[in-house]
Amino acid sequence: MKKTLLYVVWCVCIMLLASCSTTKYVPDGSYLLDAIKIQTDSKEVQPSSLQPYIRQNPNRKWFSLLKTQLHIYSLSGRDSANWFNKFLRKIGDAPVIYSEEQARRSREEITKAVHNMGYMAASVEQSTQTKKKKLRLFYKVTLGSPYIVRSLKYDIADTLIEHYLAKDSVGTTLKEGMIFDVNALDNERQRITDVLAQNGYYKFHKDFISYTADTVRSSYLIDLTLHLNPFRTSLNDTLRKHSQYKINKVSFITDFDVMRSSLSTGIDINDSIHYKGYPVYYKDKLYLRPKVLTDNLFIQPGTNYNEKDVQRTYNNFGRLGALKYTNIRFFETQLGDTALLNAYVLLTKSKHQSISFEVEGTNSAGDLGAAASVSYQHRNFFHGSERFMMKFRGAYEAISGLSSDYTNDNYTEYGVETSLNFPSFLFPFLSSKFKRGVRASTELGLQYNYQIRPEFSRVVLSGSWGYRWQRGRNQHRIDLLDVNYLYMPSISDKFKEDFLNDGKNYILEYNYKNRFIVRAGYMYNYNSIGANLTNNTIASNSYSIRAAFESAGNLLYTFSKAFSLPQNSDGEYSVFEIPFAQYLKADFDFAKNIVIAPGNSIAYHVGLGIAVPYGNASVIPFEKRYFSGGANSVRGWSVRGLGPGSFAGDGNFLNQSGDLKFDASIEYRSELFWKFQGAFFIDAGNVWTLRNYEIQPGGKFHFNTFYKQIAVAYGIGLRLDLDFFVLRFDGGMKAINPVYESGRNRYPVIHPKLNRDFAFHFAVGYPF
């Protein structure tokens, strides 16, 4: 611990020394832009809303405290050819030299921004403070009174367009008495454009909408008029009404080459068919059933052009794994006075079959091993873009710490799994309209897993039937039926003697018997940035909600009770002489990310979970129990090393599980350099049981004591954001240990010991 402290002090000293030389590469007569401050005289406009208009920003700070990258750059020597100096300059940031021109542009942009917000009498004053070679830049924004829309009129000569806008008047962003905000006016232009694009106006864009704003003399009042301008393609073109387009004909071209330079050269056709009035053109062989094409089409002949239908069609075809690209092209035609559009849905085939191999290293509580798998995937199994997958997996691990009474110390696993995914809602009695509206995928799966350990051998058979769909930012999943059969072919006498035959460890006994788990469940996910979600959670404000509910054994229990089926010696009903689990389980998680400065954010989450065994069971199956500690929980403890309650553990991680879980975390995240990010975090949480178990003393949840059993940890983390996934390294320290009721052991934050209180975690992805 003392040695670690010396390293920390040494690093701090280096940073302090480096801070003296941040102006090392600032030329004489120039200044390092040290800070920018924006001040407004009204709470109506926050300084943070004006930050995006700054054209030159100071060097970025780590965790909003230290300009570490500037310090690193300043450590480099003058010799630019030296490899070490090159390295320091590459990972560091060159000093930002204050530019009077950029500062003036920033002041103009801020002035324009507040004018657009309706404060057209606002003024922006620019000032600077210098100290040696450092400069602080200040912008003082005096807003004054905002201009208010006194009256609102519409100049729309086209009665049909006026009718469409009147039908959607609830969505307008304009109203009398509002602040004259240019951004609101532009949003209204876009809203009207969207409304008309959904009602046949294929060639309409927002430039056809303009405003006239007349100010009332000696006041801050404005009379606003919205104008709908007639259609014309150029200044020399005659003015005419906007054309409303109908869809004339829709054709499918299934072998389109997007790499060709034009539409005519990209199409390769030698055959065609007609299905329900839709021409389908293809080369050699049609790889998708025509019904799949029409079922995913929202663009219907005879209807008005609708931009939403076009986007829905794109989304539907984008879900089909048999396709690589989808393009929709429209060509104008005329029939009398009616403007028509011929639509061509251009499809590019993907590679349908693939085989992949995977090799991985494993580490289970310090026991090393290896695993390998081979997978086969077909993305168009029944010519309807069904995805079929089959995977074979094998694993081996050398187990340490076992007594000599066991015949071997090897762990071997063999498994095979297969799944079939249909890009439609397969369920009887559902109308085609409902299926088209939901656009769910149907998932079927089968798994077989055989585990051979020195203590026992176990077989897990499972089958699943579920649905998954997404609407906007909302994701839904229904597990209609999930059947798991746990079969124990053999258990060693030594394992029985040590853990199962004493009659005290009911949790172990329950989970090492043959058992059925027949469950159904529902899961809901919402993310505020929807499809824009990326790994980089520092970039934008966002929040997410996850809720899940599942139940098991209820129908089987009702059936058993109704027909008075016999019970076994433990009072359990059985299916084919195999007892089944019965429980209810619910989970909820909320996470939020708040950007506080460029490259810096605070993220937090709260998670709750409860699983209640009842009826045919007094214990939750091992796979459904809650654990605490680890990379995604309280990071001062190793995985599955915390709880339940004040229970200190007995070396068996299965006993460190519970029926109730609470997790909460807060992280300060900051961009460091290149693709690296850092984090400071504080975690809190634990698990509890709902019943008293002799082998888990102190584990039962009590309202008057549970808050004393919430563990707390703190630590730092390093993340490598590779865009498509994130590698995470976290080091956590115990702060409050619920095993102890009082004394210095309860508060290791005051008396830390590295070998006792530290836990290192490696994971993929953010913790929340």
Image (cartoon, helix red, strand yellow):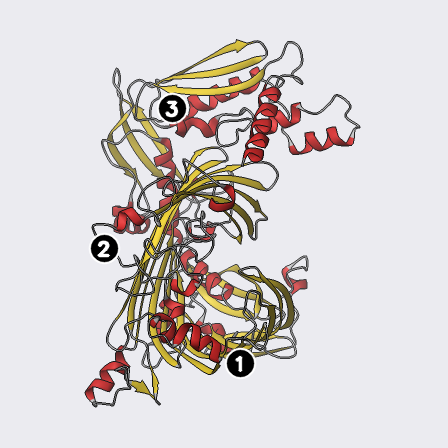
Q: Quadrant of the N terminus?
A: top right
| Residue 65 image position (x, y, % from top left) | 49, 27
Query: For mark 3, what is the residue?
Result: 115
Q: Three-letter amino acid code at disc 1?
A: Phe
| Residue 516 image position (x, y, % from top left) | 37, 80
Whether residues under marks 2 and 1 lie with C-beta atoms below 8 angstroms apart, the answer is: no
Q: Is residue 332 left or right of residue 20?
A: left
Residue at 77% over, 26% down: 80
Q: Three-letter amino acid code at disc 2?
A: His
Q: Three-letter amino acid code at disc 3?
A: His
Q: Residues within 10 Å of mark 1 (few under 14, many from 20)?
A: some
Q: Nearer the viewer, mark 3 or mark 1?
A: 1
Q: CA distance from mark 3 to mark 2?
A: 59 Å
Q: CA distance from mark 2 to mark 1?
A: 55 Å
Looking at the image, tell me whether mark 3 or mark 1 is earlier in sequence order.
3
Residue at 25% over, 18% down: 219
Which residue of the protein is positioned furthest toward the front in this rendering? 404
Mark 3 residue element? helix
Number of labels in the image equals: 3
Q: CA distance from mark 3 to mark 1?
A: 61 Å
Query: For mark 2, what is the residue?
Result: 702
* Label placed on residue 129: none
Residue at 64% over, 9% down: 29
Q: Is residue 537 left or right of residue 524?
A: right
Query: For mark 1, what is the residue?
Result: 382
Q: Nearer the viewer, residue 264 or 339?
A: 264
Mark 1 residue element? loop
Looking at the image, tell me whether mark 2 or mark 1 is earlier in sequence order.
1
Does any portion of residue 201 appear in the rendered image?
yes
